[in-house]
Image (spheres, rainbow, N blue to C red):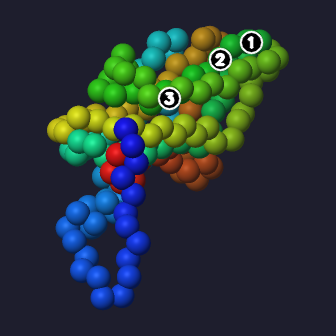
Amino acid sequence: MAINPNTTFTAGSVLTAAQQNRFPFGVVARATSNTDYTLTTSYVIATGMSVTFTAIANRYYKITYMEPQCQTATVANSDTNIQIRVTDASGTLLNTGFVRTETGSQQDTGTITLVSTSTFTAGSVTIVGCAKTTNTTGGPVLGRNAAAAGPALLLVEDIGPA
């Protein structure tokens, strides 16, 4: 789809509803979680990482999924994966990322952030943040302790018309 930007405003011009509707609408859904999430070997919706909003057709939505900390497995060449999906843990994939454990010792990473920009058909849309690991040895976890790392975040923003 082509981008539909706003026009240049000049003194004395009349501001129309169509021009107003070309502005971003801002945050339409937000979830946070302070609860640590112990990883499994299957994609599962991470604790608290699900939001539902009413989409408007032909508008772009920016989706941000941020995990503040990741403690990986203690097995060399294992992966910790996070994803943004539509509907549920097996729904349409919007973006994915991973952290690889290169050695046999647990890695304690900083923030992992995924961003996706999408359009949806009009109506109710559920976005989820999912996670999994390829190996559970060493107790891999997404660390969300508010005192240490801060909460995980799933944020959906309307950024304007398509």
Of the pair 121 and 134, the residue shown nearer to us: 121
Q: Report the Cα–Cα distance between label 2 and label 1.
A: 7 Å
Q: Mark 1 highlights which residue?
A: 77
Q: How many marks?
A: 3
Q: Which amino acid type is shown beneath numbered disc 1? A: Asn
Q: Report the Cα–Cα distance between label 3 and label 2.
A: 16 Å
Q: Report the Cα–Cα distance between label 1 and label 3.
A: 22 Å
Mark 2: few, some, or many residues within 10 Å (few <14, many ≥20)?
Answer: many
Identity of the residue drawn at 62% across and 11% down: 135
Q: Is residue 92 left or right of residue 18?
A: right
Q: Could you say where residue 136 lies in the image, as x and y percent from the top left?
A: 60, 13
Label 2 element class: strand
Which disc number belongs to residue 79? 2
Q: Is residue 38 visible?
A: no
Of the pair 100 and 6, the residue shown nearer to us: 6
Q: Mark 3 highlights which residue?
A: 95
Q: Earlier in the sequence, mark 1 or mark 3?
A: 1
Label 1 element class: loop
Label 3 element class: strand
Of the pair 86 and 2, the residue shown nearer to us: 2
Q: Earlier in the sequence, mark 3 or mark 2?
A: 2
Q: Is residue 5 left or right of residue 144?
A: left
